[in-house]
Image (cartoon, rainbow, N blue to C red):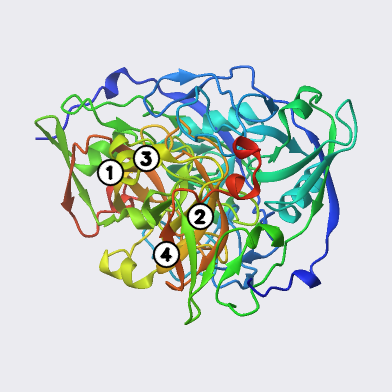
Amino acid sequence: MLRTNHDRLIKMAVAGVIAPPTMGRGPHRAKASGEPFVPIGMAGIVYNARPGCAAFGWAADHLEPAVCIHAPDPQEDYALHYLANLGNDAVVVSGEARGARGVVMGEHARFILDFSSDDMERMCPGDRVQIAAWGTGLQLRDYPHIAVRKLDPRLLDLLRIQEIGGGVLRVPVTHILPSRIMGSGWELNPEYVDQDICSNDPATVAEFGLDRLRTDDVVAILDADHSTGRGYRKGAVVIGVINHGNSWQLGHGPGCMTILSCPTRQLEPVLDPDANIARYMRCGAFAA
Amino acid sequence: MMVATNAERLVAISVAGEIAAPRMPVLPAMPHIISREGQPVIVPALGGIVYNVRVGDPAFGWVAENVNPGVSIKNREEGAHVALHTLACVGNDAVVMSGDAKGARGVVTGKSGRWSEHVIVHFPAAVLPQLAIGDRIVVKALGVGLQFAAAPGIVTKNLSPRLVEAWGINGRGGALEVGVVAVVPPELMGAGSGLSSDGGVLDIQTGDAALLKASGLDGLRLGDIVAFADCDATINAGYHKGAVSIGVVSQGDSHRSGFGPGVTILMTSRAGTIRLVPHPGVNIATMLMLS
């Protein structure tokens, strides 16, 4: 087990409400092909797709599986974004599903939470959900060169990371991707939200097997450094988690949340088709 | 031969804005920006009237963040702002409509990206001291919808007929030959990917000095014409193997990871039907005779 500062981290409550889907008066957006579409898949309660589901193939754009929450107050929403982490516990605190327990499985424009299908049937946009936020500031005591982002300390222990000496951590991943195919999100902080994988080019999708991605897969990005912001850096390695489904929009695609970043090759991805946090946590599409 | 366009069928229309005050960053550590080395930095942010940085000057080395040369304008009303930011094209005429410099004429030279979304306007040096933040400026927007008869597969944006004429683009066999200072490799395509290219910019990442130098990008000047390899900007901008996009360096370098000089996209071809011709020094300051 990796030694961390988890015993010095603060665990505190942050809260939001189940976010209703919203649209503008003219809701259409343009696919990369030029064809207009009505966006569906983001926010609200998605009844028939849960974390761990396929990232491709849905008639949806940026699918956020299961339940999305946000805080209507912008400052509270920033706190939600910067303090809550993958694997944190969530509980519904108002409405018919009061007391239902869930878990944070992704961070996009909103937070993506998994709950049981029975609990989702009793939920309504606007119901309050509280998260026991834990993990911001997490550090690896023996690997100070590797930055940790957006991880509940308990989830870190589930990632099947191997210590192989020389300051190297070996991490199972489903895909190994080059920095050059990363799109929307260069301008955002990895502590805040994800970055999309460009999926508009069919040859690139085929070359890297992008269409086999599932939400909550663990993936690697080579030659990317996300220790401060996001940037190209030769030799650097980022490990991420897929948070949302594919997109039709140019420069967009499945989203990748940063969880580990190392400026050198001391973060070593190893291919494993089962590397998925929903599988590790036995929730979402992998719930018993 | 010089490429023919549909310029005579394009509509010239007024869009307007006011000279925008500089604004400090909101994210992630107001008023600091966080550099790629993780250091908090306070430097002039983009916007306002910049007196001593002009199109044609170096894009690198300024103690500033993504500096906009000259004058930055926005419209306070959202719909009108989107129209200004979308319809104004590089090379369009701008006229000051209020204040001490009323009647002075300038030229649109570029735009800025997410969270600022300025239209950047060049004015002669003698005009700058007479301008004030809040002065109203009209742009005669002309260029959206521009097409090349010889290469209908190429999509243009932010590109005025005046710049096409001054550039001297040749068309042949469904493709265009376009002179560029340098080509940005896809690894260095940064902030702006996935965002609108009908306004906004696509940044050249500058964190890897060796790759920047090897690509001939370390000496870029504001106003230089550059290409992005494997970049499709038909709608938004993003990686697409074999595509090519061309733009003008509109903003200076950045301290932040993933950012760098901002490039306003001028044309793009998903099928790669733009043939790049090395043309050292090709710059809109010369082409548009900016004084």
Residue tagged 3: B91
Q: Looking at this view, is A271 or A21 the one in front?
A: A271
Mark 3–mark 4 Cα distance, whole angstroms, equals: 27 Å
Residues indicated by labels 3 and 4 sit on the same polypeptide chain: yes
Q: Nearer the viewer, mark 4 or mark 1?
A: 1
In the rendered structure, the answer to whether residue A37 lies left or right of residue B275 reads: right
Position in image of residue B216 (x %, y %): 26, 65
Q: Earlier in the sequence, mark 2 or mark 3?
A: 2
Q: Nearer the viewer, mark 1 or mark 3?
A: 1
Q: Judge the density around disc 4: few (<14), some (14-19), many (≥20) Cα neighbours within 10 Å.
A: many
Residues indicated by labels 4 and 2 sit on the same polypeptide chain: yes
Q: Amino acid at mark 2?
A: Asn
Q: Nearer the viewer, mark 4 or mark 2?
A: 4
Mark 2–mark 3 Cα distance, whole angstroms, equals: 16 Å
Residue tagged 2: B68
In the rendered structure, the answer to whether residue A91 lies left or right of residue A272 reads: right
Q: Looking at this view, is A77 or B162 the one in front?
A: A77
Q: Amino acid at mark 4?
A: Thr
Instruction: Kindly identify the residue that appears in the image at 60 percent across and 71 percent down.
Output: B38
Residue tagged 1: B241
Residue tagged 4: B206
Say whether marks 1 and 2 touch (CB < 8 Å).
no
Q: Earlier in the sequence, mark 4 or mark 1?
A: 4
